[in-house]
Image: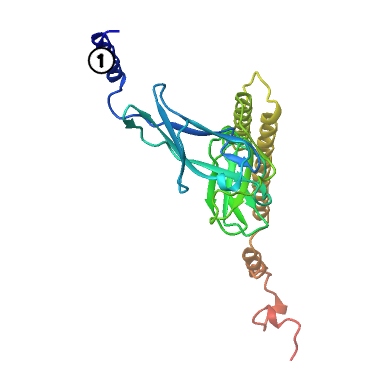
Amino acid sequence: MSPVLSALFCLGLCLGRVIRVPEGPLSEPSLQALPSSLVPLGRPVTIRCQGPPDAELYRLEKLKSGRYFDQAEIFISAMERDQAGRYRCSYQIGMRWSPPSSQLELVATGTSPKPSLSAQPSTAVPAGVTVTLRCQSQYGFDQFALYKEGDTRPFKTPERWYRADFPIVTVTAAHSGIYRCYSFSSAYPYLWSAPSDPLELVVTEFTEASRKLNHSIANEASTTEVSRNITVLPKESDPPTGLALQHYTKGNLARICLGAVILILLVGLLAEDWHSRRKPPMMHRIRAAHRPLPPLPQTQKPQGRQDRGRPDGHNRGFRH
């Protein structure tokens, strides 16, 4: 090849290289551990860094250790304590390096015995209530973590010694699943205990049929409450039945009893008035008993001889 053609070929490659270089800042790569970032001691794990297709070089490093690897992934055949820690990665295109990825926390589990996990009030609850998951250890750890299968990262909490509570407020169906918890020391944040026995949380939600049934029951209870307080008179053509008949009968009995009481009171008043009219007043009787008798009529007799010398008839029968 002639020098001119060689120069043109190199110029074309350089121009193509310049054209392929993206403008603006490079994007962050992603870093993940497969199958999980929680790795039991002695189990394999792969740490993988992923960037754009035109990335030319990857650098994967373990923080605070000074170690790094110029490759996109690291395969660990058997997890050991000193391999636990924080990792990050970046890639290079041309002369530029990408910003570092988010940090990956690689945790070695099984470094101490497992804690216990319980749920209060129960492992099967309806939606809307609050459930507390309690992780408890027999050793004096001051850090605990709760992990749900399917989640990318566990929930951590610093708590009192020996136990930690993880409240889940207003649970929904999304909170259903299998949970495990771990205990560890704040002095060794990437060396965790063995996982607790799995705990399955079941959150039940009301179906459409259940909602309709509850609505029907509520309406029936409301109707019953109204019928207790209001007496509904049926039409003349339709006799009362059921609960309406019971209230209708009670209302009639109350009216009959009230009428009977009023009638008895009226009869008593009339009898008392009639009795008082038959007996004259006591004052009248007393006056009648002390009324003076009328004077007897005077009988006039012919004056004769035997009446002489007597001024009147009162001297009769007396001798001097």
Please state the horizontal and vertical placement of residue 216, each as a whole percent of the image: 62, 27
Image quadrant holding the N terminus, namely top left
Residue situated furthest bottom in the rendering: 320
In the rendered view, tell whether residue 247 sits above or below residue 240. below
**Residue 230 showing in the rendered view:** no
SS category of the residue bearing label 1: helix
Q: Nearer the viewer, residue 193 or 85?
A: 85
Residue situated furthest left in the rendering: 4
In the rendered view, tell whether residue 235 sits above or below residue 302. above
**Residue with the mark numbered 1:** 11
Specify few, some or many for label 1: CA neighbours under 10 Å numbering under 14, 14-19, or 20 or more: few
- At x 26%, y 8%, the residue is 2
Please state the horizontal and vertical placement of residue 109, each as a whole percent of the image: 62, 45
- At x 43%, y 31%, the residue is 58
In the rendered view, tell whether residue 123 sits above or below residue 294. above
Image quadrant holding the C terminus, namely bottom right
Q: Nearer the viewer, residue 2 or 98?
A: 2
In the rendered view, tell whether residue 13 sits above or below residue 267. above
Please state the horizontal and vertical placement of residue 38, each as a whole percent of the image: 59, 40
The amino acid at mark 1 is: Leu
